[in-house]
Image (cartoon, grey):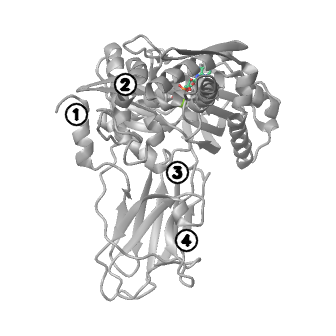
Amino acid sequence: MSQEQQGAELGDSPTSPDPDSRTTAATDATPVVGIDLGTTYSVIAHLDETGRPITIRSAEGDLTTPSVVLFDGDDVIVGREGLRALSGEPDQVAECAKRDLGLKRFHKSIGGQVFPPEVIQAYILKKMRDDAALQLGEFQQAVITVPAHFDEVRRKATQDAGYMAGLKVLDIINEPTAAALAAGIAGDYLAADGKSHIAQNILVYDLGGGTFDVTVMEINGVHFRTLATDGDVQLGGRDWDQKLVDFVSQEFAGLHGFDPRQDPNFHAALWRECEDAKRTLSARQKTHVMCQFKNHRLKSEITRQKFGELTANLLERTEFTTREVLSAAGLAWDRIDRILLVGGSTRMPMVSQMIQRISGKQPDLSLSPDEAVAHGAAFLATQLQAKASGRTPSFEIRNVNSHSLGLVGKHPQTGQAENVVLIRRNTSLPARVQRTFRTEQKGQRSVLMQIIEGESALPESCTQLGRIVVRDLPRDLPARSPVQVEFTYASNGRLSVHVKIGGTDRELTSEIVRENSLTQDELDHWRNKIAGKT
Ligand code: ADP
Ligand code: MG
């Protein structure tokens, strides 16, 4: 079929049905939680009776739980022990699964088994849930956070992870929005009556272990509106660690003729040393990395300045994105009222120095960079619960989409496949956009819509979200019959599509069939297995 204005066309082909969405609403006063499911550390929080956010400690007594999963025979152990096992049994440990969400498989096999990344995430969520249940009693309802730049596929995978962990996912919320919410409520510039306070523009710079996000938001009374957002799924504290690992490895290789990175156990042990050294450098001007293999040793001195030089290009990447987002929001620094630093890696002094240099402003360090996101999620979870029991919401969140959404069309003249964008990036959500396309041939029996996400005009450079097929069209349907396509993009970044074929009674509303997502049967299989029922 072809698009009315641009003339894009679509072919036809079959497909299979999609599992349903599992988002449900809170209905009673049972505990609800917010979970920051981080790439490297996860945090769970709830609100106490007075409405204050409280981080729930893990069974080990920690505020944050390493997002690391050790598969030890039939035992699956999440957290600290997994982290420790990394240097002894790296083949049995899964880490940074969040970076692989959206892919069919986690990037390495674990103990000879292949896991979908969302299953690893589900094990982490299960641990968070079990530990919190020790204090709150049994519960199911949770809000889970995702990076603002997560695409539709990764959001769906996150919701699926919640389902497999036995949770009822009330909603997913963008991490920077959650942080701004926590800051707004803690800093008392969110007016409960929605009237008294002046609007504020907030920039949230979130540098965690594996992802980077920057978002500009406006808070006006009770309204939270995202103005622009961007980020990098492949940039975080681990890349800073990597620079140290590379530096020390080269030094060791120069001295002893063996590169530590060639031995998995040695490599993992060095990694832990370097991560530790990095943390020390946030507090001190210099430190040492000890590196020992068989009877070869190296004690390498690292200064904060040296560390800054080694990682300057990583910091520059975040600076570049920050400037881009600010300009996408249509603002200059003088219009930014607050800069929030979130994520453990913002403890590196180089981050606040850079922010200060480019903005001329002192960043707001009043929030705990580890807990703010989970606290914001707990506020939303409680609000959704209250809303379900008929109470008036105390704040309202408006997001934008972080990637353009469109269909693959075929240009009628050139026959070239092209990305026909329906909802441009940074459009305020929820959004509904309708376009009329045309069927391609006379008597065409089905219409295929390939939904893609991305900015490129070339479909192959975009992310394939999935497909929708309308079948059983009448045999006598003329060529160039109108096909009305409507995209509805919900506030949480989930998409549904409605299609109507003119001159027929064929009409279809569908969640799209996603390329890499698990089937309902697979989800239920894992849900039982993770619960220990199989
Ligand atoms: P994520 O949300 O990606 O899981 P976090 O926000 O928990 O990440 O941040 C984890 C990252 O923060 C890790 O890379 C860790 O090494 C880093 N980090 C934590 N504390 C410090 C510190 N004091 N100095 C430097 N980096 C730190
Ligand atoms: Mg985080």
Q: Which of marks 3 and 1 is nearer the N terminus?
A: 3
> Which of the two marks, 2 or 1, is nearer to us in this view?
2
Q: Residues within 10 Å of mark 3 (few under 14, many from 20)?
A: some
Give the left or right position of residue 425, taking residue 47 as reference. Answer: right
Q: Give the residue at mark 4.
A: 418
Q: State which mark lies toward you, 3 or 1.
A: 1
Cα distance between the residues tagged 2 and 1: 23 Å
Residue at image mark 1: 529
* SS for callout 2: loop
**Taking 325 as reference, is 58 above or below it?**
above
Residue 168 location (% of width, % of height): 33, 35
**Label disc, if present, on residue 430 of the rendered structure:** 3
Where on the image, by quarter, is ligand 2?
top right
Query: Where, quadrant-wise, is the N terminus in this rendering?
Result: bottom left
Image quadrant where residue 455 sits: bottom right
Q: Mark 2 highlights which residue? A: 89
- Camera-near label (4 vs 2) is 2
